[in-house]
Structure formats: structure tokens, C-alpha cells
Image (tube, grey):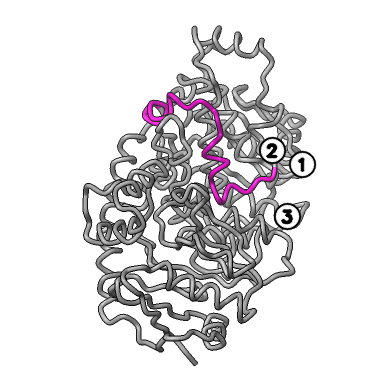
Amino acid sequence: MTDCVSLPVDSGNINEAFKGFFSNLLEQDEVQAVFLPMRQPDGVMVMHTLVRDPAHLDGLDPLAPVTPTSAARLLSALTFKKPGYRIAAFLRPCDFRAYLELAKLKQADLDQVLVITTDCSGRMEPRDFLALVAEEGDRAALAFHERAVSNDDTLARLPACRVCEHPVHDSADLAFRLLGTDLNQELVICAQTDPGRAALDRLDLEEAQSSEEPGDRAGQVDALIKTRTSERDALFQEYEEKASSFAGLRNLLKTCINCYNCRAACPVCYCRECVFLTDTFRHDPEQYFRWAGKRGQVKLPTDTAFFHITRMIHIGTLCVGCGQCSTACPMDLPVMELFRTAAHRAQTRFGYEPGRSPDEPLPLSVFEDQEFLELGAD
Amino acid sequence: MSDQDPIIVAFVCNWCTFTAADLAGTSRQKYPPNVRLIRMMCSGMVDPQFVLKAFFEGADAVLIGGCHPGDCHYINGNYKARRRVALIKEILAQYGVEDDRIWLRWIGASEGNIFAETIREMTEKVKALGPTELKKELVA
């Protein structure tokens, strides 16, 4: 049984090593398709792409620190009905966590997917990524990783990633170990599950050597989690104060334009039809005049705080903190900050951590006889 | 009733709490007129959005009334309601909505006196709290 494999990296070209690995998965028929970030025809922006022919892997760039939309949501489009193909999917830890929640919601499949994750140093807004590529060229992904792990404050990392206490995921089938290795020399991939181990065993990787876990990785992971957790707690404190009253919340959301981009971008916003797009919220014109009459004025669009609080109730227990909502917001509202703060409270209340394990049931899908007795109902 | 009087919106289940309210009326129990009853088939179908909407439209407090555990006409709707209420309270509490503005109570069909007593107690507590901040921020 192989636990870890080291793939040699020639002259810093890490994508060639990735290419060797993913094309082998296809050639050995271990999977019939791979789903991973690929450079688009302009050679710059990176989008998740479904590849079935190993000859079409040239533009792959798995570590490009950009995910223009949630890869979990994209992958679920391929698997919400059981696919007839086995897929190897490259997902960052947050995307895998969201994907696990979608699987629990029966909107995604786990059986047919070989999940490959990576130690994650974070991602950037698409526009910042373009600037980084202009500066660093093909080395952009590696340059980002090196600067991120050395806590370079000038690096335009997403706020969501700065406070993400889940830079690794231990239950993906396979995981690239970036921390503790010299990526200019080797790329280490380790199996974390039985299907992962079996896949790694069957591959026919020339030049690959079986390897140990990178020696000082555990320490680096711990340090990263510690830094991010303390930044996260500072963020919680800041937003608990800023939104400690309804007026505070309204102030933070005052310029919301009801575009619902955050809802569309959210990987775990699960309703097939959003109530805010239905006639329920297409008020009679008279209604606005009544509201304005009652208070002297009414700001339009209305129902903005209503929308956000509803979403907090819907996804509060499921939010994985990926930050796609803030990336999608055209008004630069602190959506991620508000949702992470609310979600942390909800998740603590139910003792639930989204994306930890497929075996933990969704908090609102189960109940117990004796619980929440403090609500005073008995 | 003046404008200053609190408004309580009560979502009550058809089988227990609504029947209790009916019994309170037919047995001439007195309770404050501050409550607006909305009959639901089950406390388990009280969508959190209904609670939010009530607050945004000027309610000072919301009561969700269901059957006692084990008595639910639909087996377990009240247990589901209890989890939802825990979630609503957790989310709204951080924005300063006081605990006493959201009540969950099990009131059986024969407990008209308990229904009346609950409304009396709730009205007193909500009067002491004053109007909500959400009321001031109408349809925000």
C-alpha cells in the first residue's frame, strides 16, 4: 500500500508534474474524467474544466490561487444525478467542505468522485490574480504560495482565506502536500482514504518515488491554523461589535442592491427556487406607499436585511467560509464577515462543523427528544 | 389599545394551541387583546421567514405554540420547530433581539387557562421591553 508519492519537479515547472499525475489517472482508466483548474485560451484566467482526453491537459494550473466561482457548486452540476463516469476532482479544502454539505443535501454524489485536495494557502480576487500573473508570469501560483505561507502582508489574499482555519482537509481521498516541501524540487501527494490508496497503487508513475509525509509539515499546518484562528477570532469580535444591534446590521447592509449575487455564488445556498425571486417579494406598488407613510420614508430596494437574515438562517449551520459571497458582491459589503460571524454562532449552538464528515447529519434534518430545554417550552 | 401597546404575533398549531385559544375564549378566560393569532397546521411548518416578517412588519414579540412532545398530530413537527426556534433565536440575538421576544410554548388542546396565562405573562414582559429596534427600522 502506498501512502505518499513524490513526483519530481523539473526546473520549477510544477504544472508538468501535475500533468504527469492527472494524465496517468486518465490513461490508467482510474477515472474517466478529471475536473480541475485550467488556463483559458487567453492563457491567464483559470477556470475549472472537465477533461476526458489526457492530450488536453496542457493548460492545467491546479494551484492558481483563484476560484472565480465555487468549484463545489460546479462539480455538483456534474454529479447531482449519479454520473456514469468516475471523476477525479481537484478541490481546495473549502470547496470540498461545501461539496460534502451538498452531498448531504442530496445535490451531489460522493461515490463516483475521487476527491483530490491540497494544502491551501488561500486565493485572490480574480482582478488581483490577473495583476499577479502580469508580475510573475507562469510562476504566479508558486509565488503566491511562497508569499502566503511567509505571511507577506502585501499579498492581496482574500479576507476569507486570511481567517480560514481549515487550510487542509484530512478526509479527501488524496491530498497534495505543499507545506513542508520544496515545490521547486518535488510534489508530494498522499492518500488519506482507502479509495485514495487504491488509486495511488494502481497508477504507473515513472520517476515517482514512494515517500514519507513531509517531515516538518505537521508543525507548519499547526502554525498556519493558529495564525488564522486568531485572525478569525479578531474578525468575530469586530463584527459582533459592529452588528451588535439591528441598526448596526442595517448600517453594514445599507447599500445592498438586492442583486442576490451572494446567493448565486454561495455553494451551500440550497433552495432550488429562491423565495426572494418569487412573487412573494414583488410587492404591490401600494405597499411601498404604505410603508413610506408609516415611517415617513422607505429606502429602496426594500427587504435587504430580511434577505440576508433569511440566508443566515438557511445556511448558517452549513457556511464553510469560502468567501465567494464577498467576491460576488458588487457593493463591497462585508458579506463574508457577517455570515462567518453568524454561522459560527449557529454552528456552535448545534455543535456542528460543516464539511467535517459525510456522516454528521445536517442539524435541521434531525432532532432529539431532550434538547434545547432552555427555550422554556417544557 | 394605544399605539404604544405591544403587538404579539402568535403562530399556533391547529391541533393543540389553537384549540386551547378557542377553549380559553369559550370558557370566558380573560387575556390581553395584544395577540394576533395565526393558525398553522403544525408548529413544525412555521418557516423562520414568517417570524422575521412579523418582526419587520412591527411585531414586538412572536409566540410559537405547539403540542406537547409526544402529542404532535404529525408525530414530530414540534421537535423540528424547537430546533428552528433555537436557530432563529441564535441568529437574531446577535443583532440585539432580546430572548423574551421569541417564545416557544407547548400548550395542549385542553389547556385554555394556560394559553390565557401565557399571553398575560408575555404581554407583561414585552411591555417592559418596549418596542423593538426592528420596528423602528421597518422593512429595512
Residue at image position (35%, 35%) is A244
Residue type for callout 2: Val
Residue type for callout 1: Met
- Per the image, the residue denoted by label 1 is B41
N-term-proximal mark, 1 vs 3: 1
SS class, disc 3: loop
Does B25 sit left or right of A260 as displayed?
Answer: right
Residue type for callout 3: Asp
Tell me the CA gap for discs 1 and 2: 8 Å
Residues in magenta? A247-272
Tell me the CA gap for discs 1 and 3: 14 Å
Closer-to-camera residue (B93/A165)? A165
Closer-to-camera residue (A44/A82)? A44
SS class, disc 2: strand
**Residue A235 numbered tag:** none
Does A333 sit left or right of A152 as displayed?
Answer: right
- Per the image, the residue denoted by label 2 is B12
- Disc 3: host chain: B
> How would you rate the neighbour count of disc 1 (Cα within 10 Å): few for under 14, some for 14-19, many for 20 or more?
some
- Residue B114 spot, x, y in % from top left: 63, 40
Question: Considering only vertical position in the picture, is A179 above or below A212?
Answer: above
Q: Residue A110's quadrant in the figure?
A: bottom right
- Disc 1: host chain: B
N-term-proximal mark, 1 vs 2: 2
Q: Nearer the viewer, mark 1 or mark 3?
A: 1
Pointer 1 with pointer 3, Cβ within 8 A: no
Closer-to-camera residue (A240/A6)? A6
- Pointer 2 and pointer 3 on the same chain: yes
Pointer 1 with pointer 2, Cβ within 8 A: no
- Per the image, the residue denoted by label 3 is B71
Q: Is residue A249 magenta?
A: yes
